Image (tube, grey):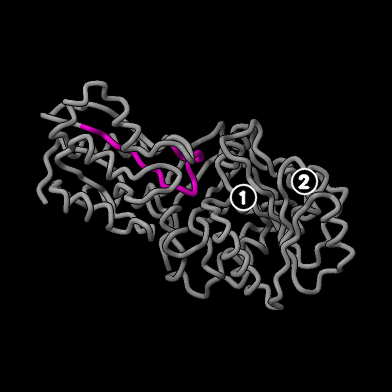
Amino acid sequence: MNYSEFDHECMRLALELAAQGRGRVEPNPLVGCVLARDGQVLARGWHRQFGGPHAEADALSQVSDRSLLVGATAYSTLEPCCHYGKTPPCTDALLSAGVRRVVAALRDPFPQVDGGGLAQLAAAGVQVEVGLLEAESRELNAPYLMLIEQARPWTIAKWAMTLDGKTATTCGDSQWISNESSRAVVHELRGRMDAIVAGRGTAERDDPLLTARPPGPRTATRIVLDSHASLSPASQLARTARETPVLVAAGPQADPANVAALQSSGCEVWQDAALDPFARLANLWRELGRRRFTNILVEGGSQLLGSLFDAQLVDEVHVFMAPKLIGGQQARSPVGGFGLERMAAARQLIAPVIEELDGDVYIRGRLARP
């Protein structure tokens, strides 16, 4: 398909608009829409809030002179929906407006759409084109696609470490490795997550709140992986469970008294029958997918992060490296687990972004699939 420069400009604008919904629309996809005619942009829209109008409807609502829409082109970052959900079908709205051409970056794999929207438009005589800036749309909606296609949340691993790769001293002291600017970025990241995950050791050692301060657009469920449900009811997590959800993921051997104490504190205890920790981890991730969690942030220690890397469940990393050295053979490193035997098998970041935050080095990026 030969697209004009104007086509590219409109789709790039639609992608920029779509990104503004991040943290506000999940588990729905991030979608932007630009309406144009005769080389002029008529309207810009995006999915702004879960349950609110979709991008196409948002853009259409901004055109007061409906005659301008007859023969117009709609550029959408995702296939327009064709089913009734929380809002009416966008395909009906586009057809009613008289839009002549629809350019979609990506087909929507959601089962109730999955090509149906494009087929409905084409059957009505609309010129339908798919694939303009598809790679960019896939990158933007990688968490949504993960949830739909693999039924699990997009998983981000985060840690702070010293220049010599340590996450704590030999005595376990870790506050604070990173500076205030780095910690502000972490809080912003937390504010758009569906869940923040830590291991029992981190919860016991640091007694964290695992909340976003100031609050972001989402309130994350705090999840503690705790085989024996031994999280103290006096911990900050348990004491604030009635204000901000806490889920304790326990194993089959958890003491019923521990479970009851946590439930009395307001925590949810999710128990899995599998004896194997790796099986429980996989089952938990499937459970989070069933709950439609789209993005989760893992702030666990070396053991948890290592297990997730070994299980190939990490999709993205955010690392804050401070210009400090603490040494010590017994000092913890960020990622434990079994690891890899050959350097050639090392997981690599795709186009990593590197920033300086008042002296700290912030490295983030998505992991290439193994």
Residue 259, how many percent across, how many down? 83, 62
Residue type at numbered disc 1: Ala
Residue that badge 2 annotates: 241
Residue 106, how many percent across, how many down? 28, 52
Label 2 packing within 10 angstroms: few (<14), some (14-19), many (20+): many
Q: Is residue 33 left or right of residue 216?
A: left
Is 216 magenta? The answer is no
Please give the name of the residue rendered at 51% of the width and 40% of the height, measured from the top-left corner.
Answer: 23
Q: Is residue 284 left or right of residue 55?
A: right
Of tags 1 and 2, which is closer to the observer? 2
Residue that badge 1 annotates: 195
Residue 3, how many percent across, how many down? 12, 44
Nearest to the observer: residue 282 or residue 286:
286
Q: Main secondary structure of the magenta part?
A: loop
Looking at the picture, does residue 271 appear above or below residue 156? below
Residue type at numbered disc 2: Ala
Q: Is residue 315 visible?
A: yes
Q: Is residue 328 visible?
A: no
Nearest to the observer: residue 229 or residue 127:
127
Looking at the picture, does residue 211 appear above or below residue 131? above
The magenta stretch spans which residues?
Answer: 21-35
